């Protein structure tokens, strides 16, 4: 029985799925961009020896207009570095604003919960008369002692 990665590699190499290989190269190109330009690029593709770059916001168009050579140079570097991307070349770069950004790009959620070292030792008095509150405070005390 064949392994799943062998089957996927075979499917990926078929001519019908050449678009997947190009998508890999486009993602690699986006990952080589400077961080401020990564946010600007929604997606890109090559058609008729022209690299089309869809922008996430119209304000980036002016800034990136002066850096078109950067895209062309990075595309040639990615093509030289990775054998899968040798066929992708572009002599022109066209920038345009994307209307379909919400469908294409989803922001990654980064956890910003701070984790602190517990400073309490669990030695505190419970001055409540309510039995439910006493039970809750006892659970808190036990969890503090477990962390120590």
Image (cartoon, grey):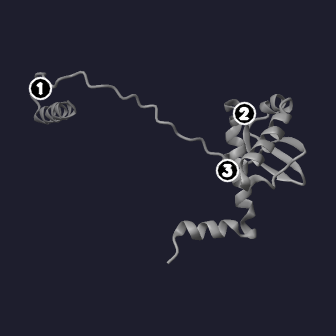
Q: Looking at the image, is mark 3 or mark 2 earlier in the sequence?
A: 2
Badge 3 marks a residue whose secondary structure is: helix
- On the image, the x and y values in percent for residue 129 come to 9, 28
Disc number lying in front (2 or 1): 2
- Residue at 73% x, 54% y is 83
Q: Which residue corresponds to mark 2?
A: 37
Camera-nearest residue between 52 and 73: 73
* C-beta proximity under 8 Å, tags 3 and 1: no
User: Do the residues under discs 2 and 1 have CB atoms within 8 angstroms?
Assistant: no
Quadrant in the picture for residue 97: top right
Q: Name the residue under label 3.
A: 103
Q: Could you tell me which residue is drawn at 84 percent across and 50 percent down?
A: 89
| Residue 63 spot, x, y in % from top left | 81, 28
Q: Where's residue 60, x and y in %? A: 78, 32
Left or right: 133 in relation to 56: left
* Label 3: how many Cα within 10 Å (few below 14, some 14–19, many 20+): few
Nearest the viewer among 15 and 106 is 15
| 19 over 105 or under it: above or below | below
* Quarter holding residue 16: bottom right
Residue with the mark numbered 1: 128
């Amino acid at each position: 029985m064949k392994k799943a990665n062998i089957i996927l590699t075979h499917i990926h190499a078929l001519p019908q799925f050449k678009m997947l290989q190009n998508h890999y190269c486009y993602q690699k190109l986006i990952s080589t961009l400077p961080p401020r330009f990564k946010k600007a690029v929604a997606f890109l593709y090559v058609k008729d020896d022209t690299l089309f770059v869809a922008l996430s916001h119209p304000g980036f168009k002016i800034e990136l207009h002066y850096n078109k050579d950067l895209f062309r140079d990075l595309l040639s570097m990615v093509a030289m570095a990775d054998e899968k991307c040798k066929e992708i070349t572009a002599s022109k770069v066209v920038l345009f604003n994307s209307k379909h950004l919400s469908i294409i790009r989803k922001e990654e959620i980064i956890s910003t919960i701070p984790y602190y070292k517990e400073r309490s030792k669990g030695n505190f008095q419970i001055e409540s008369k309510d039995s439910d509150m006493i039970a809750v405070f006892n659970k808190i005390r036990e969890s503090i002692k477990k962390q120590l």
